[in-house]
Amino acid sequence: MTQEIIDFLSKHYILTLCTYDGKNPYSAPLFYLFFNNALFFLSDQNTTHAKHILVNPEVSVSIFTYTREVKNIQGIQMMAICKFLEHTKNLTKSIIFNFKNFELDLKEIYDEYCKKFPEAYQFSSSLWGIFPYWIKYTNNQIQFGYKTIWRYEDDTGN
């Protein structure tokens, strides 16, 4: 993943998650933690977006700065696989999750998420991971129409 994409994802905290269950599209704004080149969020399994993900894990994500000036537009568009990771009530000890090139300690991720969003400790929920395979980063502050494309294969050689 390029450094400019990592920097952008690291400094923001709200994403729009778009899901599709084969019948209906849906979008949801969510707080996220960017950690180890993936994004993590908490959500109940009974939400529409969670139900969609359990049927179809292919998702798209957008993250952007709010501006009315075209020259200040910055944002991410992403295609990814989203996975249910664990119920937060079970994250009292390290649980290792493996997916593709990711080996993650879910307890560590949950603790980092709760450091960023302390109110999350108050709610029993589920931890979810978004694992990008394609990202387009736009930054009109560099130049109008400036874009960087990153693909999972760029890092893995696959």
Image: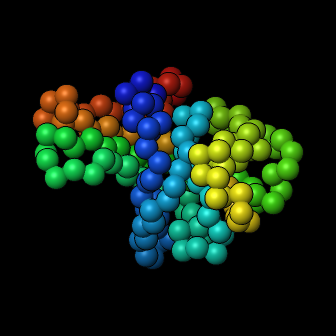
Vertical relation: 80 (above or below) 50: above
Q: Residue at x 44, y 54 (%)?
A: 15
Residue situated in front as seen by the camera: 151 or 69: 69
From the top left corner, tell me how far across and down residue 18 is, in percent. 43, 62
User: Which residue is drawn at the image coordinates 81% and 51% (left, top)?
Assistant: 91
Q: Residue at x 53, y 50 (%)?
A: 32
Question: Depth check: 96 or 113 in front?
Answer: 113
Q: Is residue 90 left or right of residue 133?
A: right
Coloring basis for residues = rainbow
Query: Furthest residue to the right?
Result: 93
Residue 73 seen anywhere in this rendered image of the structure: yes
Q: Image quarter for residue 56?
A: bottom right
Q: Position of residue 126 (x, y in %)?
A: 69, 61
Quarter-wise, where is residue 47 in the image?
Answer: bottom right
In the image, residue 71 above or below residue 117? above
- In the rendered image, residue 61, in percent from the top left (x then y), is placed at 42, 53
Q: Position of residue 64 (x, y in %)?
A: 33, 48
Quarter assignment of residue 71 = top left
**Residue occupying the point 64% across, 75% down:** 46
Q: Is residue 85 left or right of residue 149?
A: right
Q: Nearer the viewer, residue 52 or 43?
A: 43
Relative depth, front residue between 139 and 18: 139
* 81 over 100 or under it: above or below: below
Question: Number of callouts in the render?
Answer: 0
Kindly tell me whether residue 134 is visible in this rendering.
Answer: no
